[in-house]
Amino acid sequence: MELITPSLGLLFWTAIIFVVLMLILSKFAWKPIVSALEEREKFIADSLSQANQAKEEMAKLKSENEALLAQARSERDKMLKDAQTVVTNTIAEAKDKAGIEAEKMIANARVQILNEKNAAITELKNLVATTSVEIAEQIVKKNLSNDAAQKELIEAYLKESKFN
Amino acid sequence: MATRTGMKLNRLKSLLFKTLLAVLFASFSTVFASEEAAPSEGEETKFNAAEMIKHHISDAYDWHLFGEGHASVSIPLPVILYSTTKGLQVFSSANFHHGTEAYIGYKLEHNHLIAEDSTEKIYDFSITKNVASMMIASLIIILIFLSISSSYKKNVGQAPKGMQSVFEPLITFVRDEIAEPNIGPKFAKYLPYLLTVFFFIWVNNLLGLIPTGANTSGNIAFTMTLAVITLLFTLFSGNKDYWMHIFWTPGVPMPLRVIMLPVEIIGIFTKPFALMIRLFANITAGHIIILSILSFIFIFKSFAVAGVSIPFAVVMSLMEVFVAALQAYIFTLLSALFIGQAVAEHEHHEDHH
């Protein structure tokens, strides 16, 4: 029976000690410890969410970069292709131009050659004419020593020259 | 008494306890029988296990270390008493000479302080062994947590170090596993009490396991005080719903309400009563088991028994270390639960009772 009979002194001291202990601990231990724990937990939670955010941003940036890179690549390809076409076009154009020029030159040369030929022919004609006249003069000088015959011939020439 | 309550609460332990006590009492009868048969044996050689165990689990006016009777060595503790005739008296318990002598009209009878003059009424406020042990426990707790508290101020926002990392999980355990789930959003108000009661019971339990230590947390006065504090917390934090449930249980037919009223009022007190008995019985039973096992050695007066008793006592001590933490946890958990019931906001009254 003694075991389950609470003694007054022990009840008194337990109450006093416990209440004093609780007051001391509440003020000097639990309050600062619990608030420090809460602060740290908040800090950790914030840091974690921030890290997640940074990760997301990084992923976003990466995808953006990739898109940018792809765009740049396609642009480069396009530019290369364009350049290629330009080159081909230029070459073709140049070829065409050169052909036209050559033809032109050939045509010119032809004209010139023709002109030269004509000139040469004219000159040759003149020369043949002069020579023929001179020869004819010589012949005529010998055959037409009389004036009558000379007159006749002159008139014939005059007639002819009138038609010219 | 301890046996009966112990059985009620912890089946495993009570089974062990019952078996051990049966063996113990069986051996007692043989010892007594042999003593009757051979009265030539001296008084001092008699070993009374029940007396020894009772002495060890009871409170005392001095802190007994070792030795028997006049040869025993103990630390004297202050006796403080208030007498209706002589007023306040303070003196050392050494004056009783281990309870063999009377001092200024007071004497120890069966480890109990009484006045020689039977007409004198005394109120005993002595710093007994249990009180001294409790003070040591409080001092240890204060030293630990004030040093931890200063560490928190020193390394703000940093990872815990040393003692901090030992006790931080325990503090967060009490907060996150005991207080918050059982009390709800208002838990912060009760957290200091729960933390204090948890560590107070635990440290007192552990101090009790040290040889020569006091059975403080296995004392009914100790557990009663803590249970009453939990009761006061429950009563003073009870909201309208809580009292409504007790005095005019909703969702119950009228005649039943009349029957429910006394049941509910008894219920207010049975909860802390269970807290009181549970802690007392578990800790006291643990002490009795270990002492009983060790008593076998002296009952059988054989070294061979020691070979069995000592390892068994070591195993039981280890289990008691676990029980020390477990009972602190259970007391704190149930206190939180009772407070939680008192502060809970009931949405559906019909769900209960």
Image: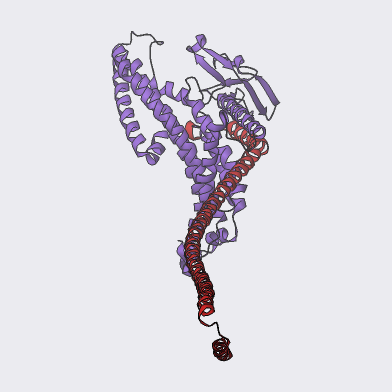
Chain colours: A red, B purple
Note whether residue A1 is visible: no
Question: Up-down: is B116 above or below A34?
Answer: above
Question: Up-down: is B340 above or below B38?
Answer: below
How many labels, in total?
0
Q: Which residue is outermost to the right?
A: B87
Q: Quadrant of residue B286?
A: top left
- Residue B192 percent coordinates (x, y): 61, 42
- Residue B302 percent coordinates (x, y): 30, 12
- Residue A76 percent coordinates (x, y): 51, 57
Residue sitting nearer the eye, B160 or B258: B160
Q: Quick check: B322 left or right of B307?
A: right
Question: Up-down: is B69 above or below A95?
Answer: above
Residue sitting nearer the eye, A157 or B35: A157
Residue at left offset 50%, top offset 77%: A139
Q: Quick check: B70 left or right of B240?
A: left
Quadrant (top left, top right, bottom left, bottom right) of the N terminus of chain B: top left
Question: Up-down: is A113 above or below B138?
Answer: below
Q: Quadrant of residue B26?
A: top left
Quadrant (top left, top right, bottom left, bottom right) of the C terminus of chain B: bottom left
Residue sitting nearer the eye, B67 or B211: B211
- Residue A3 percent coordinates (x, y): 48, 32
Note whether residue B134 is visible: yes
